[in-house]
């Protein structure tokens, strides 16, 4: 009986000790978990910019302006807490990648994606936006200073024509936006205090500057098209085979190229083409069955 009593006491002390150890380990685990929940502060310093989160309504309007769909791959340059990639995946069904230099912030973005239930669609890369490859993006979002946008601009302009670029608050120098996004209206409009920001939207244009030989224009055997390009805007000279020439202006919407000119009868025509490297395949707005081809000479 005495042995059973002593055994019972020992077993009780073991249970108490085990419970105390478990309780201690659980508290340590909770403390570690709490420590892992990094909490950034607005205006905290980053590598090149301070961190300020994009307002929720502007995030949505930026992604809407870019017409994001489940077929898109969205890259957010300077992803912060992951708000934009998460919204692109959760609301628009896109795959999204955020590039964030701060390891703590990148880890927070991963946790946020997990909590939002989109970790299978969102990847957060801890890296430098000037070193990471995002050339396969169909949509690029950013919230950087103008100086950083300008540094990125050559890379963006070399992306596939039709790639959509959306910036919170800051522009791209002389590359004029295709759309100014007002969160209150979703489109062009004056900034009001209630909107909390403004976005700018560009479509990467195809490269058409140079000399082109054009065939298929009605009433014209061949023509030469000499173009100068400033981002999505073009102007130049269209010269017919009989040496008649005229100044022309055009516009690019990604790979789609629109050009206005006067035909052999001095009638205004609109040439609509698709740029494919050194070829432009086109028709006329008033005659969609017309087959026109332009070939790059140099």
Image (cartoon, rainbow, N blue to C red):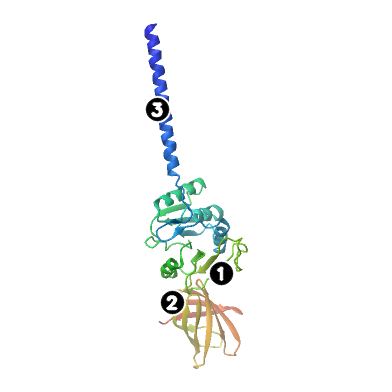
Q: Observer-nearest residue: 44 or 60?
A: 44
Between the residue at mark 1 and the residue at mark 3, the CA separation in whole angstroms equals: 61 Å
Q: Quadrant of residue 297?
A: bottom left
Q: Is residue 91 above or below residue 241?
A: above
Residue under pointer 2: 278
Residue 80 in the image, given as x and y percentages of width and height = 46, 55
- Front in this rendered view, residue 164 or 21: 21
Residue located beneath label 1 in the image = 179
Farthest residue to the top: give it. Answer: 1
Residue 202 point in image, percent of width and height: 51, 69
**Res 159 visible:** no
The secondary structure type at the circle numbered 2 is: loop
Locate residue 76, reporting x and y percent. Answer: 47, 59
**Callout 1 crowding tier (Cα within 10 Å): few <14, some 14–19, many ≥20:** some
Point out which mark residue 21 bears. 3
Q: Earlier in the sequence, mark 3 or mark 2?
A: 3
Helix, strand, or loop for circle 1? strand
In this rendering, which labeled residue sits more in front, label 2 or label 1? 1
Whether tag 3 and tag 2 are in contact, CB under 8 A, the answer is no
Q: Going from the N terminus, do you reach mark 1 or mark 3 first?
A: 3
Percent from the top left, x then y, of residue 165?
49, 65
Kindly identify the residue that appears in the image at 45 percent across and 49 percent down.
Answer: 108
| Front-most of residues 41 and 236 | 41
Residue located at (42% from left, 25% from top): 19
Q: Quadrant of the C terminus?
A: bottom left
| Residue contact between numbered discs 2 and 1, judged by CB atoms under 8 Å | no
Mark closest to the chain's N terminus, 2 or 1: 1
Q: Is residue 261 visible?
A: yes
In this picture, is 17 found above or below 32? above
Quadrant (top left/top right/bottom left/bottom right) for the N terminus? top left
Question: Which element type, helix, strand or loop, lies under badge 3?
Answer: helix
């Amino acid at each position: 009986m005495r042995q059973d009593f002593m055994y019972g006491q020992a077993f009780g002390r073991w249970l108490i000790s085990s419970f105390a150890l478990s309780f201690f380990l659980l508290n340590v685990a909770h403390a570690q978990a709490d420590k892992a929940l990094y909490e950034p502060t607005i205006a905290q310093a980053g590598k090149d910019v301070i961190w300020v989160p994009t307002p929720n309504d502007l995030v949505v309007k930026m992604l809407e302006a870019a017409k994001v769909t489940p077929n898109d791959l969205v890259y957010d340059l300077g992803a912060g807490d992951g708000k934009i990639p998460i919204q692109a995946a959760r609301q628009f069904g896109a795959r999204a990648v955020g590039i964030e230099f701060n390891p703590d912030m990148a880890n927070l973005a991963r946790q946020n994606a997990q909590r939002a239930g989109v970790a299978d669609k969102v990847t957060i890369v801890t890296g430098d936006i000037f070193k990471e490859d995002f050339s396969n993006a169909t949509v690029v979002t950013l919230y950087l200073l103008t100086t950083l946008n300008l540094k990125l601009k050559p890379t963006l302009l070399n992306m596939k024509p039709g790639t959509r670029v959306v910036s919170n608050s800051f522009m791209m120098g002389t590359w004029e936006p295709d759309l100014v996004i007002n969160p209150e209206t979703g489109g062009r409009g004056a900034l009001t205090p209630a909107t909390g920001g403004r976005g700018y939207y560009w479509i990467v244009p195809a490269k058409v500057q140079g000399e082109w030989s054009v065939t298929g224009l009605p009433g014209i055997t061949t023509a030469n098209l000499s173009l100068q390009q400033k981002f999505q805007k073009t102007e130049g000279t269209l010269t017919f085979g009989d040496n008649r020439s005229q100044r022309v202006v055009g516009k690019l919407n990604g790979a789609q190229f629109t050009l206005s000119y006067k035909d052999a009868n001095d009638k205004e025509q609109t040439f609509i083409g698709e740029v494919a490297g050194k070829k432009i395949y086109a028709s006329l707005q008033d005659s969609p069955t017309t087959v026109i081809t332009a070939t790059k000479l140099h």
